[in-house]
Image (cartoon, rainbow, N blue to C red):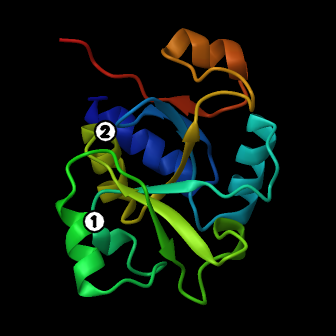
């Protein structure tokens, strides 16, 4: 897991519209504040991807997604009890930001099992946008060096994992 200081710094940057790279359950991801339209647009530009293509939201728990999604108790239980990195496509609430939803007014969400993501979302108090750490059409970055090579100063922070 990244250091506590580093995670808090990343949360500060996200609150101010920043873009970060971080380890997820599966690969390195890029993320930002899902409630910040400018940050979301900047992330699309950095990735060189269409702004029409929606992002996934990662959260520490289902409560962080509740303001954005419509789910029943059975769906909530299934999502909350999943221990694998499974993404769920869920109906969005009518007031969910338009830049987060697709044409069918759905959101793709995941409850993260990654300690860094969990801590980051807990500090922020909400989910974060996530997308693979690569320019569109390229292989996702596997480490900090590849992230730096792909994005050359266009992202605000890389959360590295501490090796023991």
Residue 2 position by quadrant: top left
> Mark 2 or mark 1, which is nearer to you?
1
Residue 117 locus on image (x, y percent):
35, 44
Instruction: Classify 10 Å Cα crowding around label 2: few (below 14), some (14-19), many (20 and above).
Output: many
Instruction: Give the residue pinned by disc 1.
Output: 79
Residue 141 vertical position relative to residue 37 in the rendered view, above or below:
above
Of residues 84 and 124, the one drawn nearer to the viewer in this rendering:
84
Dot 2 or dot 1: first in sequence order is: 1
Q: CA distance from mark 2 to mark 1?
A: 20 Å
In the rendered view of the protein, which quadrant contains the C terminus? top left
Residue 34 vertical position relative to residue 135 in the rendered view, above or below:
below
Q: Is residue 96 left or right of residue 115?
A: right
Q: Is residue 129 left or right of residue 115?
A: right
In the rendered view of the protein, which quadrant contains the N terminus? top left
Q: Residue at x 32, y 35 (%)?
A: 5
Disc 2, SS? helix
Q: Residue at x 25, y 13 (%)?
A: 163
Q: Residue at x 81, y 37 (%)?
A: 48
Callout count = 2
Residue 98 vertical position relative to residue 114 in the rendered view, above or below:
below
Disc 1, SS? helix
Of residues 49 and 14, the one drawn nearer to the viewer in this rendering:
49
Residue 57 locus on image (x, y percent):
49, 58
Residue 101 position by quadrant: bottom right
Instruction: Classify 10 Å Cα crowding around label 1: few (below 14), some (14-19), many (20 and above).
Output: some
Q: Residue at x 23, y 81 (%)?
A: 74
Residue 148 locus on image (x, y percent):
63, 16
Q: Is residue 66 left or right of residue 150?
A: left
- The circle on residue 116 is 2
């Amino acid at each position: 897991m990244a250091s506590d200081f580093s995670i808090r710094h990343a949360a500060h940057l996200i609150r101010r519209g920043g873009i970060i790279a971080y380890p997820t359950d599966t690969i390195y991801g890029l993320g930002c504040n899902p409630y910040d339209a400018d940050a979301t647009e900047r992330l699309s530009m950095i990735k060189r991807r269409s702004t029409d293509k929606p992002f996934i939201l990662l959260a520490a728990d289902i409560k962080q997604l509740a303001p954005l999604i419509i789910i029943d108790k059975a769906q909530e239980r299934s999502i909350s009890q999943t221990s694998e990195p499974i993404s769920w496509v869920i109906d969005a609430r009518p007031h969910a930001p338009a830049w987060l939803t697709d044409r069918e007014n759905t959101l793709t969400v995941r409850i993260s099992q990654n300690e860094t993501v969990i801590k980051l979302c807990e500090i922020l108090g909400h989910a974060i946008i996530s997308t693979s750490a690569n320019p569109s059409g390229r292989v996702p970055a596997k480490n900090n060096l590849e992230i730096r090579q792909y994005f050359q100063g266009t992202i605000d922070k890389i959360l590295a994992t501490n090796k023991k």
